[in-house]
């Protein structure tokens, strides 16, 4: 996907910066919060209100894969919820997910189609799963 055309230029892939440059400086609490399954236990951690808000935002707006996370403006409405304040205030049109890698059977060897040529759905009309291929 790196270098594919996008509305304002080209898609650029990003990686997490070095640990000392990361946004969160409370790794110990964040890791403990993320690894806890029970909601009642999560509420005992310092910062649980903030972590919960961020977690809900990512759940409502992002698709996560093994090595990526993709934000979609307006995804909060997909599950029948009302559009959130962030999406209402954010300028620009609603966005769509980038299609997942799809094999190019016309080429020899192991090749994938470019993002702009990749079909968004299979022959059954359903969106491709990330690990289909």
Image: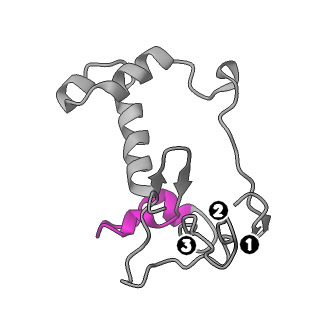
Look at the picture and state if 32 lies above or below 79. Answer: above
Percent x, y for residue 7? 74, 72
Q: List the residue tagged with mark 1.
A: 7
Q: Quadrant of residue 111?
A: bottom right
- The residues bearing labels 2 and 3 have C-alpha atoms spaced at a distance of 33 Å
Q: Earlier in the sequence, mark 2 or mark 1?
A: 1
Q: Is residue 84 magenta?
A: yes
Q: Residue at x 30, y 66 (%)?
A: 79
Q: Nearer the viewer, residue 124 or 87?
A: 124
Q: Residue at x 43, y 23 (%)?
A: 30
Percent x, y for residue 42? 27, 26
Q: List the residue tagged with mark 3.
A: 94
- The residues bearing labels 2 and 1 have C-alpha atoms spaced at a distance of 29 Å
Point out which mark residue 110 bears.
2
Percent x, y for residue 50? 41, 32
Q: Quadrant of the N terminus?
A: bottom right
């Amino acid at each position: 996907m790196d270098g594919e055309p996008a509305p304002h230029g080209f898609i650029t892939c990003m990686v997490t910066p070095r640990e000392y440059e990361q946004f969160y400086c409370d790794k110990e609490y964040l890791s403990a919060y993320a690894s806890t399954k029970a909601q009642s236990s999560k509420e005992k951690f310092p910062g649980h209100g903030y972590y919960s808000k961020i977690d809900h935002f990512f759940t409502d707006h992002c698709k996560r894969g093994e090595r990526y996370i993709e934000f979609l403006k307006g995804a909060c409405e997909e599950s029948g919820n009302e559009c959130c304040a962030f999406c209402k205030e954010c300028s620009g049109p609603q966005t769509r997910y980038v299609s997942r890698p799809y094999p190019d059977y016309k080429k020899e060897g192991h090749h994938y189609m470019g993002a702009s040529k990749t079909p968004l759905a299979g022959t059954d009309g359903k969106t491709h799963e990330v690990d289909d291929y």
